[in-house]
Amino acid sequence: MRRTLVIALTVLLLGVVASWLIPVQAQQPAAPPPWKQGQPAELASSPLAPVPQPPSPKAPGEILVDKIKVPTGFKVELWAHGINNARVMTWGSKGTLFVSSRVAGNVYAVVDKGGTREVKTIAKGLNLPNGVAFRDGVLYVAEIHRITKMVGIEDKLDAPPAMEVVYDTLPKDVPHGWKYLAFGPDGKLYFNIGAPCNICIPPDTHANISRVNPDGTGFEYFAHGVRNSVGFDWHPVTKELYFATHARDWLGEDLPSDRLDVAAKKGLHFGFPFCHQGDTPDPEFGKGRSCGEFATPLLKTGPHVAGNGVEFYTGSMFPAAYKNRIFLAQRGSWNRSQKIGFRVMMVTLNPGGAPTYEPFAEGWLQGGDIWGRPVYTRQMKDGSLLISDDYAGAIFRVTYQP
Amino acid sequence: MALAVAVLLAATAQVGRAGDVEAGRQKSALCAACHGPDGNATAPGVPSIAGQPNFFTHWQLIKYRDGRRKDAQMSAPAQNLSDTDMADLAAFYEAQRPRPRGSKTEPARVAEGRRLAALHHCTSCHRPDLSGQQQVPRLAGQDLDYLLKLLRSFKAKTATDLDGLMTMSAQPLHDEDIVNLVHFLASLGAETP
């Protein structure tokens, strides 16, 4: 409650209509909805707002797969559709692709039947179940407030087992509360606990990447000052954690940049809410702090691009130069009048130098209109790459033939 | 190329088809019993759904079907709806003209509610005229008893919305604020200016 009051008063100080001040002192106003926090008074009538999630997936005829451009030699096909709000993809050990959703509340199993794909809903009515990870026959699902598991799920897709709680000592805040979930090289489950706001001093329990053992023991914070990271992966050789972060809104068309970071060890602080993109103090919360206190980004990935999926390419289908490149799926902007993102970028790490950063797949944005939003990638066993699209409710497959 | 690879499964063959207003009308007989033939309800406590944004109605039906929103009247019938049914019904009700419910409101409460609606940022998502948009419902002219019950449920954290914003927004409200707010909302004309 005190936190709410602090946020609310801060907003007032930022210059929301002065005539409100007198009645407000007598009663606690609500903070504005999180997406509107930090909006300067002069932009109060801005038409910019988050893109609404359609309630149903697009029909194949509305999915403009031919518009997706990839480098020469690569080909894109529509691999599966009708998966409402399709988000994170993870492989079972017997060839099942498990797919999460966010606001749709579902977890799906996609079974490849050699040229045909069957989609089964294995859980529904969940609390924004964005995170799915699989190991040793067990599917782990991260909702906002808990991590659960479904043991032996791959043999019971038509009669899924109960969801057993693994860990549920988690904040219940919905804003930035949905989680990415993945096994680290240490065998622990890693997930984000995002800041419950656009910009605020978050509670000590938020704005981090955390980890817990798969049996629910040993919870600890791994990285701090992370506004919201809903995509990460570990370098195949160095085993270091690479993660994407969405930066705050309402500082302008081109500020601040989203970022790609590397956390070589536990305990680093990545700047939120004091410093953005490694070099730009927050106009309010950066006072009295220095960007020099915090870890700097490996790469500024662009303003408002909304980088989600982070995945190192380890397959053998793509050209040799693709080995250990990072695919970064960008769901795309809302807080920018010129839309940006809506593409899959690739990052080539150059030892001793700046990474190379270039498009891999783009075309979801046509002029000012979007028909889909690429959100995560997942390699197939044969080295081809799946791309999920939560707006179209579809999964694309990218192949390469020299 | 896309269609050559796309797989149409029986269960999902009709996903994504845009809702059909006429099909929705034909499927609305059961709904009409409480919500009225054109989505304008008359019984106190029952919401009007005429003129509600398509996405809002569709998402609510999904939530009733999946148990994320529960109601003695709505939970059971929602179980039988296909995705296409939901899309058709949502399209039908969006196309209907909302009428004010004529709930009895008190001018002093309306005036205070108007101030509270701005203070608590209701208009940020529900639009300045409270007509709703996308997944956010129309509130203008809605039934007073329904609004009162729902807003109190958000305050009590027993109601859920798609993204948690209403639960957050209701927490600073005292019950007196809730009463004033719903008097204001119910007093508004249902027509979008």
Image (cartoon, coloured by chain):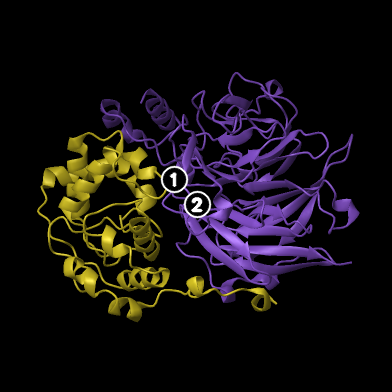
Chain colours: A purple, B yellow
In percent of width and height, residue A17 lies at: 37, 37
Q: Reading the chain from its start, which is encountered first: label 1 or label 2? A: 2
Residue on which the image places disc 2: A50
Quadrant of the rendered image containing residue B19: bottom left
Q: Residue furthest top?
A: A288
In percent of width and height, residue B63 lies at: 36, 56
**Crowdedness near tag 2: few (<14), some (14–19) or many (≥20) residues, C-alpha within 10 Å:** few
Q: Residue at x 40, y 62 (%)?
A: B55
Label pair 1/2, CB-CB below 8 angstroms: no
Subunit ID for the residue under disc 1: A
Q: Residue at x 18, y 56 (%)?
A: B143
In terms of secondary structure, where does tag 2 sit? Answer: loop
Q: Nearer the viewer, mark 1 or mark 2?
A: 1
Instruction: Judge left or right: residue B43 versus residue A113.
Output: left
- Kind of residue sitting beneath label 2: Pro
In percent of width and height, residue B81 lies at: 35, 68
Q: Residue A127 got which mark?
A: 1
Quick check: can you spot residue A174?
yes
Q: Residue at x 37, y 23 (%)?
A: A2
Q: Residue at x 43, y 34 (%)?
A: A15
